Image (cartoon, rainbow, N blue to C red):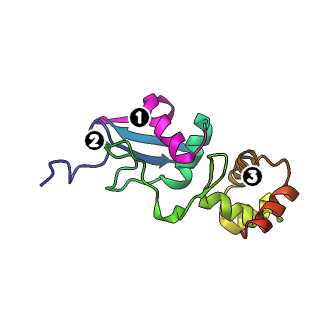
Amino acid sequence: MNAHKNMLPGMNSKEVEFYAVGDNKVMAIHDEQIWNFQELPQFVFEIIRKTMGFNASVAEMQHFILDHYNRLDFTPDISEDGTMSIPEHLGNLIPLENGQVITASEVRVLSLYPMPDKNIADTLCLAESTVIGHGQSIRAKLGLTNRAECALWTSRNGI
């Protein structure tokens, strides 16, 4: 039996377990310590960026973690081998030709993009700032400048 099997993830030196405190603060358990997100070792940010598919800022990474890894469980979010788990609710990420990915959360926002941000937020039970952030991220990833271009891209790609 694995001695670490009944331990909370993050209690060994390689694993990381993320969780949310309040609406916008990310904490992590790593190397038997509790960390503020911004103070985690650089290798953790590199793994998150690799999972996200682009050179995300700390704020973008924190937003991603808040959206997808915000509760404690017994499966590490980053395993001993440096692999970041993909939560089931993310479904399949949409890989882009430029090497970036559109997350399932971004697809949900994108599919409602003809609506105003406030209406999208209400429909998806998200903060309006989250919808705005997804919109900015989507446009940057796709190299688009406005909602009309996003709507056309969505139509052409069957979303």
Instruction: Provide residue 132's location: percent of width, then percent of height.
Output: 74, 51
Would residue 40 be visible to someone looking at this image?
no
Q: Nearer the viewer, mark 2 or mark 3?
A: 3
Instruction: Provide residue 95's location: percent of width, then percent of height.
Output: 61, 55
Q: Residue at x 68, y 55 (%)?
A: 127
Q: Give the SS element for disc 2.
A: loop
Residue 11, above or below 134 = above
Q: Which mark is residue 11?
A: 2
Q: Give the SS element for disc 3.
A: helix
Q: Is residue 9 magenta?
A: no
Position of the N terminus, as image quadrant, is bottom left
Q: Which residues are magenta?
A: 31-54
Instruction: Provide residue 155's location: percent of width, then percent of height.
Output: 79, 68
* Mark 3 crowdedness (10 Å alpha carbons): few <14, some 14-19, many ≥20: many
Please, which residue is most extreme toward the left here? 1
Apparent side of residue 96 relative to residue 62 in the rendered image (left or right): right
Sooner in the amino-acid sequence: mark 2 or mark 1: 2
Q: Residue at x 46, y 56 (%)?
A: 86
Question: Are the residues at dot 2 and dot 1 in contact (C-beta closer than 8 Å)?
Answer: no
Calculate the distance from the C-alpha at mark 3 to the C-alpha at mark 1.
Answer: 29 Å
Please state which amino acid type lies under the numbered disc 1: Trp
Which residue matches tag 3?
135
